[in-house]
Image (spheres, rainbow, N blue to C red):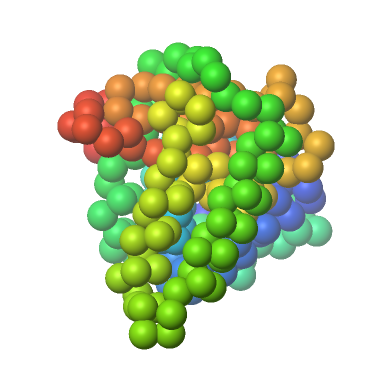
Amino acid sequence: MTVLHLADETEAADLAAFLSRLLHYDRGAAVRLQAAGTALAVFGRPPSFEVLAVRAVRLSKPYEDGLELTLDATVSAGELLESVDERAATAAVPAAVTGPPWAGVLPPRGGWRPEPGLPAPDALRATVAAVVAEFRSRTEKLAPDARTRAELDRIGRDVWSREIGGTGLPVRAVHAAQSLGFLRPGTRAADTGLFSSGAWLRLRTPYGSVAVRRSGLGPLGVSVR
């Protein structure tokens, strides 16, 4: 069995926390792992937010498995979580699974350029709190016979698809970043950023990134790997 040696206990704990949050939204969640050198990228897609979440994990030594110098596999998030040993700072790579469609289409590796207009982290969290409050208020005002799944979904699309300023970044992407532990209290504006590459937008923080496809741009910038 392939064992990943993480940089330290903190990296192991953060990986476990990320996997736990993904499993909170989807008990059958899968993650795609890509490792090369001393870097491991863990990709997941919490269905509630329709975004791609990326957690970068530092390894204590270059990844290698026999003559293979890179790792690329889609595995069960639950099985990976069970294998994380925080005290030993290790994780065993589970057997590969048939990945969901999103696992075959990832954001490009390079070509990212900074985009202006991203508010400070505190302002982003305030925006999410205001939209959550609005969603609850609008749904609570519905008459019992009007409280259908279709109507709740309609309200959800209305509030969560709104853009942050003129950046093109939907509020749901910021909500996902906060819910997955990427947009933590105390995060500095200097450590966050918004980037674009082709049809993709990426909100980056010190704890992880959230990527989302911009609508109306077609298949530009897709990396199928």
* Depth check, front residue: 127 or 38: 127
Furthest toward the left, the residue is 218
As drawn, is 4 to the left or to the right of 53? Answer: right
Residue in view at x 30 percent, y 28 percent: 199
Q: In the rendering, at what x and y percent does residue 139 appear?
A: 49, 69
Looking at the rendering, which quadrant does residue 40 occupy? top right
Question: Measured along the vertical axis of the image, is residue 68 above or below residue 155?
Answer: above
As drawn, is 110 to the left or to the right of 164? Answer: left
* Depth check, front residue: 174 or 223: 174
Q: In the rendering, at what x and y percent does residue 205 appear?
A: 63, 33
- Residue 199 visible in rendering: yes
Residue in view at x 30 percent, y 22 percent: 198
Question: Measured along the vertical axis of the image, is residue 79 above or below residue 62?
Answer: below
Q: How many marks?
A: 0
Residue in view at x 39 percent, y 39 percent: 212
Q: In the rendering, at what x and y percent does residue 24 appear?
A: 56, 69
- Residue 68 visible in rendering: no
Looking at the rendering, which quadrant does residue 70 occupy? top left
As drawn, is 93 to the left or to the right of 191? Answer: left
Q: In the rendering, at what x and y percent does residue 146 appear?
A: 36, 78
As drawn, is 149 to the left or to the right of 210? Answer: left
Residue in view at x 39 percent, y 51 percent: 158
* Depth check, front residue: 181 or 118: 118
Question: Measured along the vertical axis of the image, is residue 73 above or below residue 174?
Answer: below
* Depth check, front residue: 207 or 109: 207
Give the quarter of the figure containing the C terminus: top left
